[in-house]
Image (cartoon, rainbow, N blue to C red):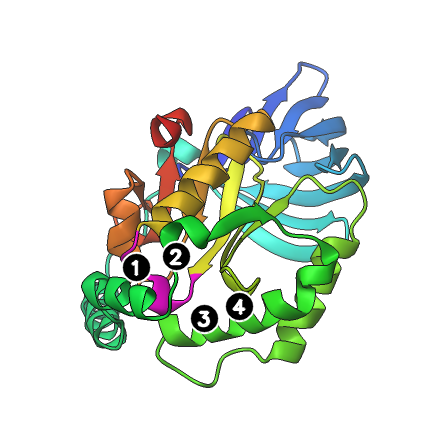
Amino acid sequence: MITGRWGRPSEVLLDLVVEADGSVRGVANPGRQNALIRQGRFDAASGAVSLDGDYTQPDGTTLAFHIRGRLDGRTLKLAYEFGDMRGQVEVVRVEEYAPPPLTVWDRLRPRLAALKRWINARSRPTGQANARRLHERGESLDSITLREAVAADIPALAELHVTTWNATYHTTRGPTVATRTGQWNQVFAKKNRRDFVLVLEDKDGRLIGFTWGRPHEGEVEGELSKIYLRWEYHGLGLGRRLIVETARRFLERGIHSFVLFGELSNPTLGFYDRMGGERMLDDRGQFNGGYRWRDVRTLIG
């Protein structure tokens, strides 16, 4: 029988119940997409499995999925079609999953990332220096405003995205303004949007920081997909302001928890720790840059 949960503890792919007549009920991606199986069969003699159903996306549209395969020993060997996605996967019961052992590279990678993080951070000015320069420019924190972005902001948002991404990772070879413009055009062109973009602008209307929040499938309801701030404004409390206002917008939309997936080489990881983010570990206990806030109200105060 294939009754039970299949996948691994951090990512359950199937939660199945087989009835006496061989019919199968359950869901695909439980806790994340909760895609309901409308019709399923399991042949105990041959081990053949067929599962069909659909998944309702956050925007209300529906994707059909089809899963075919067989039980081979204690492993389900499956081919799947999920909307436009196609592939093959082999899964075992969650309670039988054994993560692969850590390799030398697995142990070395966090140390190399920490070195890159240190190198990237060296070019970042201190908060004291930024506060002094802010005053010299005739600016104040009170002159910096926060608002929701609109489609007319796309050119400035694309430039800001490129500039801040390159500064964060200490490179000039990141995605181009044209690439970012295309990406943001796609975001703002969607109908029935449930995401939001917040921007900070200086007294002259120049964008200096932004966040992008959107719904997230699964146990955690939201995702802080992007948060960037020009480096000359770091260390002034503006990053905190951005993340707090993002949490407020999540709560206004009925989203009570959110995740953020960062890069291990990002020098601002410590900021997420200070903001109360819970480091997310994979099945081998490794931290890969992901943070979780279980209750957005802890950020709002």
Q: Is residue 182 above or below residue 72?
A: below
Question: Residue 66 at x, y = what percent?
Answer: 76, 43
Determine which quarter of the picture holds residue 115: bottom left
Earlier along the polypeptide chain: callout 1 or callout 3?
Answer: 3
- Answer yes or no: do the residues labelled 2 and 1 have beta carbons within 8 Å? yes
The amino acid marked with disc number 3 is: Trp
Q: Name the one closer to the observer, 93 or 232.
A: 232
- Answer yes or no: do the residues labelled 1 and 3 have beta carbons within 8 Å? no
Q: Is residue 35 above or below residue 266?
A: above
Q: Is residue 1 visible?
A: no
Q: Is residue 80 visible?
A: yes
Q: Nearer the viewer, mark 2 or mark 3?
A: 3
Determine which quarter of the picture holds residue 102: bottom left
For label 1, the residue is 268
For label 3, the residue is 165
Quarter of the image where the N terminus is located: top right
Residue lying at 55% horizontally and 34% vertically, measured from the top left: 249
In space, the residues marked 1 and 3 are separated at their CA atoms by: 12 Å
Q: Is residue 100 magenta?
A: no
For label 4, the residue is 161
The amino acid marked with disc number 1 is: Thr
Boundaries of the magenta span: 229-236
Residue lying at 70% horizontally and 53% vertically, measured from the top left: 150
**Position of residue 170 in the picture relative to residue 32 (left or right):** left
For label 2, the residue is 262
- Residues packed near mark 1 inside 10 Å, few (<14), some (14 to 19) or many (20 plus): some
